[in-house]
Amino acid sequence: MNYNVEHPIFNNIEFVFSPKQKGWFHQRDNNECQFPVFHSDDAYTPCGNDNRLQVHHISPQRWSKDVPHWNSGQIDSKDNGIVLCEEHHQLVHEDMHEAHANYKRNKKSYEVIFQRRDREVKQKQKYWNPRWDELFKRIAIARNKTFDELFPR
């Protein structure tokens, strides 16, 4: 089981869930991608892929840290994370596919993407596809109600 499919560039970035928090999300989400391949108002069918899993900030930290009504406790909270497979995570963050594809030719490809994201945030432009945000939040909150483990800080 691969819990952290992350490039080494992420090791020094401040806006990631801690290893204990990531483990908590993987347990809560049964080590499966929770991307809704089918959903209605009261149910959903998750992707279920258990390979190349990543924990996704539903409201990304880069964006949320500048939102006045958010505090750091909310950004890294159990309600703001969901496990996605790499394929579905890249549907949300399409620029990461670009960075990954270009990395062999340009070792700074991730840095370039993160700098572009910073510029977009300053311009109040969302750098991710927010189409699934509300549904991801509903899924995370519902899963939290049936998971008893304390969320690590």
Image: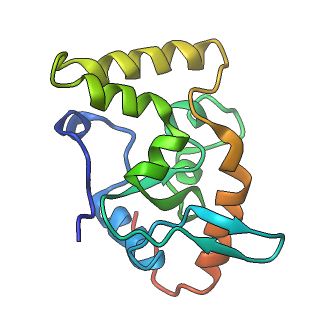
Which of these two is toward me, 152 or 119?
A: 119
Q: Is 84 left, or right, of 109 in this rendering? A: right
Q: Residue furthest right?
A: 41
Q: Is 76 left, or right, of 110 in this rendering? A: right
Residue 125: image location, x then y, percent: 65, 20
Q: Note whether 44 is above or below 133 in the view shown.
A: below
Q: How many marks?
A: 0
Which of these two is toward me, 104 or 18?
A: 104
Q: Note whether 55 is above or below 34 in the view shown.
A: above
- Taking the spot 64% from the left edge, 12% from the top edge, the residue there is 123
Q: Note whether 8 is above or below 47 in the view shown.
A: above
Residue 31: image location, x then y, percent: 38, 74
Q: Is 23 left, or right, of 73 in this rendering? A: left
Residue 138: image location, x then y, percent: 71, 65
Residue 27: image location, x then y, percent: 39, 78
- Taking the spot 48% from the left edge, 18% from the top edge, the residue there is 118
- Taking the spot 70% from the left edge, 43% from the top edge, the residue there is 131
Quadrant in the picture for residue 8: top left
Which of these two is toward me, 37 or 26?
A: 37
Which of these two is toward me, 67 or 4?
A: 4
> Looking at the rendering, in which quadrant would you find the N terminus?
bottom left
> Looking at the rendering, in which quadrant would you find the C terminus?
bottom left
Q: Is 134 left, or right, of 79 in this rendering? A: right
- Taking the spot 40% from the left edge, 15% from the top edge, the residue there is 115
